[in-house]
Amino acid sequence: MVETKLKVGGMSCGHCKMHVEKAISGVAGVSYVDVDLDKGEAEVSYDETVTDIDAIKKAVNESGYKA
Ligand SMILES: [Cu+2]
């Protein structure tokens, strides 16, 4: 299990936070996600045998934000 923090740009409100959390939690292998809107950061735990940070960043970018 890997725990990491990820910078996420483009979030401006609670709705954005929800979008990003939904996008990240939709990635197979992600077991935990918490987005801090003020810091522009996402705390993520994932199983490194299932996914990787690039897949998580891709999901964020595809949801319209900038990882
Ligand atoms: Cu928003």
Image: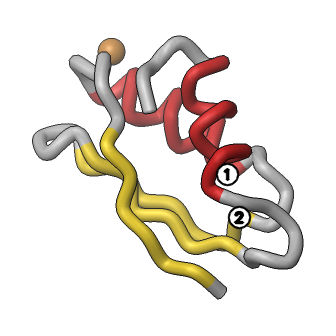
Q: Which residue is rendered at x = 66% and y = 72% of the image? A: 46
Per the image, label 2 sits on a secondary structure element best described as: strand
The crowding category of the residue bearing disc 2, from other C-alpha atoms within 10 Å (few below 14, some 14 to 19, many at least 20), is: many
- From the viewer's perspective, tell me whether residue 40 is left or right of residue 2: left
Ligand 1 is within 8 Å of the C-beta of the residue at disc 1: no
Q: Which residue is mark 1?
A: 25
The residue depicted at 47 percent of the width and 34 percent of the height is 18
What amino acid is found at the position of numbered circle 1 in the picture?
Ser
Q: CA distance from mark 2 to mark 1?
A: 6 Å
Q: Residue 30 in the image: state x and y as whole percent.
A: 71, 64
Q: Quadrant of residue 10?
A: top left
Q: Indicate whether 42 appears above or below 66.
A: below
| Picture quarter with the C terminus | top left
Q: Quadrant of ligand 1?
A: top left
Checking the image for residue 30, the label placed there is 2
Residue 9, placed above or below residue 7 = above
Give the position of the N terminus as an image quadrant. Answer: bottom right
Q: Where in the figure is residue 5, as x and y percent of width and height? A: 36, 62
**Labels 2 and 1 touching (C-beta < 8 A):** yes
